[in-house]
Image (cartoon, rainbow, N blue to C red):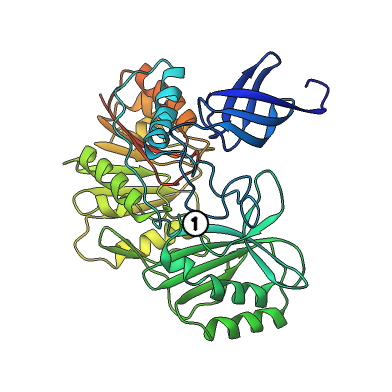
């Protein structure tokens, strides 16, 4: 097994790894086995630490039938790489998600009580990223097969909102008009309150294909906008997203929370912690998911490195009645974090960084003495690192809540609150 050749073996799965694969202990070391569960006896084709499931010898009582025909090693149209844990019972799956947070915190010596997982439901996802490619016969649209560039063209997707799934034919039609070659490309589809927002990336398209795309869009209902590499191709109506009663029109390809229920859960936790604070800084503010909600009761300073997202936030704030003053600042917080002295004027700080976390910013927060901090994260590992910086400076973790925004995947959101 150590020379790179593949061999077959029968093993017992010990536990689930951080990516949702089963892990078996062997004499040669751990072996990772997708689509398996703890306690199962399985036959594997093993190549070093990786493996492919050949057959299931003894199934776990926690194994369930996956709801999607595209899932698993024997999927009808191939193995869709969009989900990894459809075969796990709810009890096992929910415990796995919560334990991702617990284990990450423990790795940094942090032992706060971690709340119950806020669960996700099928059909909640309002944002999906598809891969597409034109072939001689059809336009493939779906997800890449696990550990492969092969596109599994989907006809259903139980995690994605009915508003997107019901429009797959229209998305294919528009993508076929846009595709000028056989090269693969990505389409980020967001369901907004005014229609679908389609953001194409990875294509070079001439005028002929742009005109064909406009014609295809105008021939369909329910399409708010189509953009290509960040530039609007056609926009029958401005996309609109309601953030706690404030309507924002996000720029093409802008980051939005993947599900509305998860966003609302995160917002409740953040707003509950901020409480009666009069001045709040929202770092990595994006289009204003938290800033615009907080502005109902407090003055907000929103800091974000993406200029277009910040302009959308600013426009929404200026055109909504009943908000406290919202100021905005374009700033790369990785390269130029807000300094401790700048932060001292705020009663509370919220930060929601990308997966890399906010290590440099947290060192400044640690020195600032701000009374309340709300940390939002999509990566338990970097969150644990950031929280360890803050607790070392005397902050106390008051609450940790894991939130399942990415159903049947190994990704989990977390909101942690701290006080000093």
Where residue 188 sits in the image (x, y, percent)? 55, 61
Where residue 316 sits in the image (x, y, percent)? 33, 64
Residue 209 found in image quarter: bottom right
**Residue at the spot 71% in from the left edge and 54% down from the top edge:** 150
The tally of labels here is 1
**Mark 1 sits on what residue?**
307
153 or 243, nearer to the observer: 153
Residue 96 found in image quarter: top left
302 or 209, nearer to the observer: 209
Q: Is residue 22 left or right of residue 396?
A: right
Where residue 269 sits in the image (x, y, percent)? 26, 41
Check the image and name the residue furthest to the left: 276
**Residue at the spot 44% in from the left edge and 23% down from the top edge:** 103
Above-or-below relation of 204 to 293: below
Q: Which quadrant: the C terminus? A: top left
Q: Which quadrant: the N terminus? A: top right
């Amino acid at each position: 097994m150590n020379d790179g050749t593949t061999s077959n073996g029968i093993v017992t799965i010990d536990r689930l790894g951080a990516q949702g694969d089963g892990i078996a202990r062997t004499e040669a070391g751990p072996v990772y086995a997708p689509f398996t569960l703890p306690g199962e006896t399985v036959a594997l084709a093993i190549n070093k630490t990786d493996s492919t499931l050949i057959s299931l010898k003894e199934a776990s009582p926690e194994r369930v039938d996956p709801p999607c025909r595209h899932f698993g090693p024997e999927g009808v149209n191939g193995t869709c790489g969009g989900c990894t844990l459809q075969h796990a019972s709810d009890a096992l799956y929910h415990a796995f998600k919560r334990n991702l947070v617990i284990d990450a915190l423990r790795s940094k010596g942090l032992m706060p009580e971690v709340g119950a997982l806020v669960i996700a439901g099928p059909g909640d996802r309002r944002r999906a990223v598809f891969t597409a490619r034109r072939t001689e016969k059809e336009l493939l649209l779906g997800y890449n097969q696990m550990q492969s560039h092969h596109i599994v063209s989907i006809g259903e997707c139980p995690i994605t909102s009915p508003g997107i799934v019901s429009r797959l034919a229209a998305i294919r039609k528009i993508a076929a008009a846009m595709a000028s070659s056989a090269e693969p490309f990505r389409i980020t589809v967001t369901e907004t309150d005014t229609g679908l927002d389609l953001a194409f990336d990875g294509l070079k398209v001439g005028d002929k294909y742009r005109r064909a795309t406009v014609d295809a869009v105008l021939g369909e209902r329910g399409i708010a906008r189509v953009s290509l590499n960040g530039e609007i191709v056609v926009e029958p109506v401005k996309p609109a997203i309601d953030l706690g009663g404030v309507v924002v029109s996000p720029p093409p390809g802008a980051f939005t929370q993947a599900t509305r229920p998860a966003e609302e859960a995160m917002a409740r936790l953040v707003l509950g912690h901020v409480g009666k604070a009069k001045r709040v800084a929202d770092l990595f503010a994006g289009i204003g998911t938290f800033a615009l909600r907080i502005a109902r009761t407090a003055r907000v300073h929103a800091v974000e490195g993406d200029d277009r997202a910040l302009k959308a936030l600013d426009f929404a704030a200026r055109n909504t009645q009943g908000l406290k003053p919202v100021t905005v600042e374009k700033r790369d917080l990785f390269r130029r974090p807000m300094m401790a002295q700048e932060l001292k004027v705020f009663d509370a700080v919220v930060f929601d960084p990308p997966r890399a976390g906010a290590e440099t910013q947290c060192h400044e927060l640690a020195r600032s003495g701000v009374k309340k901090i709300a940390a939002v994260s999509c990566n338990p590992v970097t969150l644990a690192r950031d929280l360890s910086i803050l607790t070392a400076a005397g902050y106390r973790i008051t609450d940790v809540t894991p939130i399942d925004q990415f159903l049947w995947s190994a990704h989990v959101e977390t909101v942690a609150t701290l006080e000093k």
